[in-house]
Image: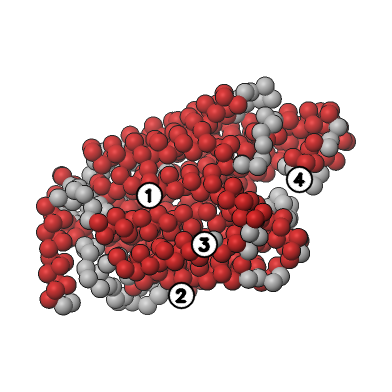
Amino acid sequence: MTGTAKATLEKAGAAGAADESGPQPRSVRVVLMALMITMLLAMLDNMIVSPAMPTIVGDLGGMAHLSWVVTAYTLATAASTPIWGKLGDMYGRKGAFLTSIVIFLAGSALSGMAQDMGQLIGFRAIQGLGAGGLMVGVMAIIGDLVPPRDRGKYMGMMTGVMAVAMIGGPLVGGTITDHLGWRWAFYINLPLGAVALAMVTAVLHLPKKKAQGRIDYLGAALLTVGISALVLVTTWGGSEYAWGSAVIMELIGIGVASLIGFLFVQKKAAEPIMPLHIFRSRNFSLMSVIGFITGFVMFGAMLFLPLYQQSVQGASATNSGLLLLPLLLAMMAVSMIAGRVTTATGKYKVFPVVGTVLMIVGFFLLAQMDTETSRFTSGVYMAVLGAGMGFLMQITMLVAQNSVEMKDMGVASSSATLFRTLGSSFGVAIMGALFNNRVQDVMSERAGSLGSKATEATAQPSAESLAKLPEVVRDAYQHAVSAGTHSAFLLGAALGVAALIASFFVKETPLRGSGPADKKPAGDADGDSAQAVREPVAEAV
């Protein structure tokens, strides 16, 4: 380290010691802006691409392989998430993050240039590999730059990015596809990514790291196979293959065997991909469970609420993101308030408890919706659920990061992200299976053979095909959708009870940062020493 760099580091450390809760330096605010742009890229992608799917099929053909355009991306993202976290811990957060951005942008450019469906699927997998490092990089870098006590300020910002992506993504995707062509649904990532890349390169300064051990290649391979198998089970189960089919059973066997092997390898590896000691922290393990359940119910709600509004309440599907406004706005507002309160008080245990209670109440209310429920009433129910999610979405990551040492910040961030991702995959699959089965049963009861034929291919007919159905079948379908959402949302409420039980066991460990948290003794099961807190102070590189 040069003398100038050392002086810079000591000066920054002294300033941080004096007032870690004070205003962030301008360079940190610029980095946070770049991180939010990158986070937006990661969350927008599928939202923008989805409206372009029919046009893509019309241009490239390959309707039979259409689902793989999404599946390849999802698989690559989920499988690479924990690996990116470990690479950041071993070799430095900045290098790993910039690499993931470059890979994501390369995949985006290649996807836009694809000439057939096979190429598009392959390029989407490359894009997904990069995407796996985007969200993890954002969370881990924020963990490096901002003490947990102050990190609550940025909860609302991150939740706001999610809301913007969910509301604006489909609208932007449809507009781009209609006016510029489907290829620009991928090219749009390039200017945004270039801005984030330039800002991070120029302004982000973190200590360089040199790994002492080798990458756990065997553990990485086993984890990749295990995650891929489980994601394929949730993607194919009940759609491509019956749940009890040989293919699904084989995938379950492969997934379980791989993950068991992975656990054994992690015990002996010098640099494990997912160090098992992080699960010794009660708070980290509980946040992993709550994060999994939150992902499970959150994305299930995102899937079935627009379907109910379109099929039963007659809402337009054109701006589907707008249908979720009550939920998303409540989630964003509550997340912002919870973050400010966390920063001001350093307390957080109340938020998982209140959040899970509101989540249970919200899902129970949504389960009561029927064909007569007004949009205003359903909007109020969604706002209750959104408020519950607002208390949970970012606090799970905050507590998980506060529960490990700084050297494990990357793997803690990636593990928390992975559990939420797997939860969303299982949620969409299981709630979808429950919904579809209930729709089929009610359609058969109310419309007989006509009802069965109307939904034999899918329990979710398009608005166009629904309008062409006889009135008796259309009425039966509306009741069937109400019954299906009732079952799915009751499952969400039941899982919320499990999350509530877990939240009661969360330990109120002081957040590192300003005030008494800095006096926390070294060696605490759910915290770091003061020296570990000082580790990521900015250094000239």
The disc, 4 or 3, on the residue closer to the chain's N-terminal end is: 3
Classify residue 344 as left or right of residue 43.
left
Q: What amino acid type should be assigned to the residue bearing mark 4?
A: Thr
Q: Position of residue 386 (x, y in %)?
A: 47, 35
Q: Which residue is drawn at 11% across and 52% down?
A: 18
**Does residue 269 appear in this view?**
yes
Towards the viewer: 234 or 21:
21
The disc, 2 or 4, on the residue closer to the chain's N-terminal end is: 2
Numbered-mark total: 4
Q: Is residue 151 above or below residue 334?
A: below
Q: Identify the residue under disc 2.
A: 217
* Local secondary structure at mark 1: helix
Q: Identify the residue under disc 3.
A: 189
The disc, 1 or 2, on the residue closer to the chain's N-terminal end is: 2
Towards the viewer: 330 or 536:
330
Classify residue 82 as left or right of residue 173.
left
Give me the disc on residue 458.
4
Instruction: State the image quarter where residue 466 is shown.
Output: top right
